[in-house]
């Protein structure tokens, strides 16, 4: 019983150390680290969770090794973000390209197939966006993050500013 209590105390201490490390590293690198703005950011979130879990669940792994792993993961993400912001070529290599799934009321079947989005998935997203009629849809975009954006409004409403809102979207 005493051994289990000692292990729980060690686990709690390691958890506190890792929690503090995450807070400190996030304050240094910035909150963008946990956004889902690009696939790279999603990978950082998953890797962070894996390092924390491995550090806490493996009693043979020193907590400082877990902290070092977190620092390396965040450093790689920070470097990648800097490279992406300074080079459009790097951004094209690292990031997914958003894809137009609907142009107005027209469903772009080829783009659905290319992005492996089903009509059922698309209809679910339209319902989530409270689209009542396909004539309300201005466009639907599968974002680089995997999210689906539905731009809609009254058919006779304000026109869509395509040049700005669809810049970089594959048609």
Image: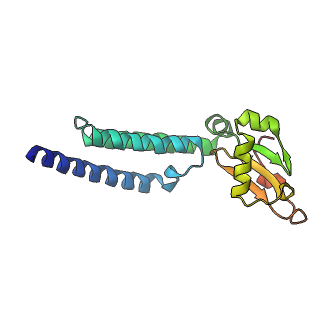
Residue at 50% x, 50% y: name it. 33
The residue sitting at the right extreme is 156
Front position in the image: 24 or 2: 2
Q: Is residue 91 left or right of residue 166?
A: left
Q: Is residue 164 left or right of residue 117?
A: right
User: Residue 52 location, x and y as percent?
Assistant: 35, 44
Quarter-of-image position of residue 62: top left
Q: 131 or 111, which lies in front?
A: 131
> Is residue 141 visible to us here?
yes
Q: Position of residue 50 (x, y in %)?
A: 39, 40
Residue 154 left/right relative to 73: right
Q: Residue at x 82, y 55 (%)?
A: 137
Q: Is residue 47 above or below residue 22?
A: above
Closer-to-camera residue (112/96): 112
Q: Quadrant of the C terminus?
A: top right
The residue lying at 31 percent from left, 49 percent from top is 18
Q: How is the image coloured?
A: rainbow
**Observer able to see residue 75:** no
Mark count: 0
**Rendering coords of residue 109 (x, y %):** 81, 38
Position in image of residue 48 (x %, y %): 42, 43
């Amino acid at each position: 019983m005493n051994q289990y209590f000692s292990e729980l105390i060690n686990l709690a201490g390691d958890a506190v150390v890792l929690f503090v490390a995450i807070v400190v590293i996030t304050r240094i690198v910035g909150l963008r680290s946990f956004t889902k703005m690009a696939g790279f950011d999603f990978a950082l979130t998953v890797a962070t969770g894996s390092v924390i879990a491995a550090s806490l669940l493996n009693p043979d792994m020193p907590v400082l090794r877990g902290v070092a792993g977190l620092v390396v993961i965040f450093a790689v993400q920070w470097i990648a973000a800097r490279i992406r912001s300074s080079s459009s070529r790097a951004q094209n290599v690292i990031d997914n390209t958003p894809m137009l799934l609907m142009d107005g009321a027209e469903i772009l079947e080829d783009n659905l197939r290319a992005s492996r989005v089903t009509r059922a998935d698309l209809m679910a997203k339209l319902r989530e966006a409270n689209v009542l009629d396909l004539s309300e849809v201005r466009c639907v975009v599968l974002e680089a993050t995997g999210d689906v954006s539905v731009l809609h409004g009254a058919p006779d409403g304000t026109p869509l500013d395509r040049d700005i809102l669809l810049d970089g979207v594959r048609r």
